[in-house]
Image (cartoon, rainbow, N blue to C red):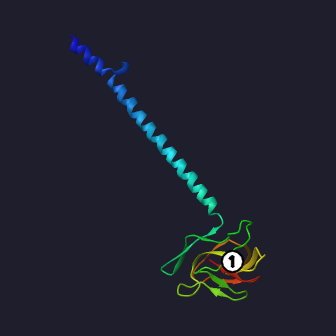
């Protein structure tokens, strides 16, 4: 009789049946895993948000694959007051005022994404015609040039990074 009572006490931990105990244990594990996942995602999101705000004034670096230009990260504005940084880096293309350039896979100006930088101090905006449309751009604006698309800077020289 005593051995039967001990087995019953072992089967009913804290007054719960084994079935209910395993359900509560499984729900606790799932809840713990969910909380850990939410914490990890919140930390990753906050880190990426900080990284984006730190790199807000950066132009993309360039990678060329199959004669198409892809961006990846280079500085375009460096000064604390927000003034333009016009340091020429390798891979930058300077467009002369009034000269027509065409994006070609085998040419100097490859199709792809570019960040437009002002070359003249004090000029934050400049007029550029891409294709048939003229528009005013600001230092650090990005454009995408397709194969065969033309670009002309009208107001003053600019640099594509």
Q: Point out the image quarter for the N terminus.
A: top left
Q: Position of residue 44 (x, y in %)?
A: 53, 52
Q: Nearer the viewer, residue 59 or 134?
A: 59
**Residue 77 shown left or right of residue 66 in the figure:** right
Residue 16 can be seen, yes or no: no
**50 is higher (above) or lower (below) than 59:** above
Residue 60 can be seen, yes or no: yes
**29 is higher (above) or lower (below) than 139:** above
Quarter holding residue 139: bottom right
Q: Nearer the viewer, residue 150 or 53?
A: 53
Q: Point out the image quarter for the C terminus.
A: bottom right
**20 is higher (above) or lower (below) than 150:** above
**4 is higher (above) or lower (below) than 154:** above
- Residue at image position (56%, 88%) is 107
Q: Nearer the viewer, residue 149 or 63?
A: 63
Q: Position of residue 74 (x, y in %)?
A: 60, 72
What secondary structure is marked by label 1? loop
Mark 1 neighbour density, 10 Å: few (under 14) some (14–19) many (20 or more): some
Quarter holding residue 83: bottom right
Residue on which disc 1 sits: 86
Residue lying farthest to the front in this orientation: 80
Residue lying farthest to the right in this orientation: 122
Quarter holding residue 156: bottom right
Count of marks overlaid on the render: 1
- Residue at image position (69%, 77%) is 86
- Residue at image position (32%, 20%) is 12
- Residue at image position (47%, 45%) is 37
Q: Position of residue 4 (x, y in %)?
A: 23, 14
**Residue 41 shown left or right of residue 7 in the figure:** right
């Amino acid at each position: 009789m005593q051995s039967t009572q001990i087995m019953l006490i072992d089967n009913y931990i804290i007054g719960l049946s084994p079935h209910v105990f395993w359900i509560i244990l499984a729900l606790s594990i799932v809840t713990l895993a969910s909380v850990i996942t939410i914490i990890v995602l919140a930390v990753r999101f906050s880190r990426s948000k900080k990284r984006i705000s730190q790199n807000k004034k950066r132009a993309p670096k360039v990678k060329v694959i199959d004669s198409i230009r892809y961006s990846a990260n280079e500085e375009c504005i460096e000064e604390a007051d927000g003034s333009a940084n016009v340091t020429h880096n390798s891979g930058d293309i300077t467009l002369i005022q009034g000269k027509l350039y065409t994006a070609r896979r085998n040419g100097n100006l490859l199709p792809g994404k570019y960040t437009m930088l002002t070359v003249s101090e004090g000029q934050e905006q400049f007029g550029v015609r891409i294709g048939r449309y003229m528009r005013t751009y600001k230092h650090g604006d990005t454009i995408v040039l397709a194969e065969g698309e033309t670009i002309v800077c009208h107001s003053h020289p600019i640099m594509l990074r």
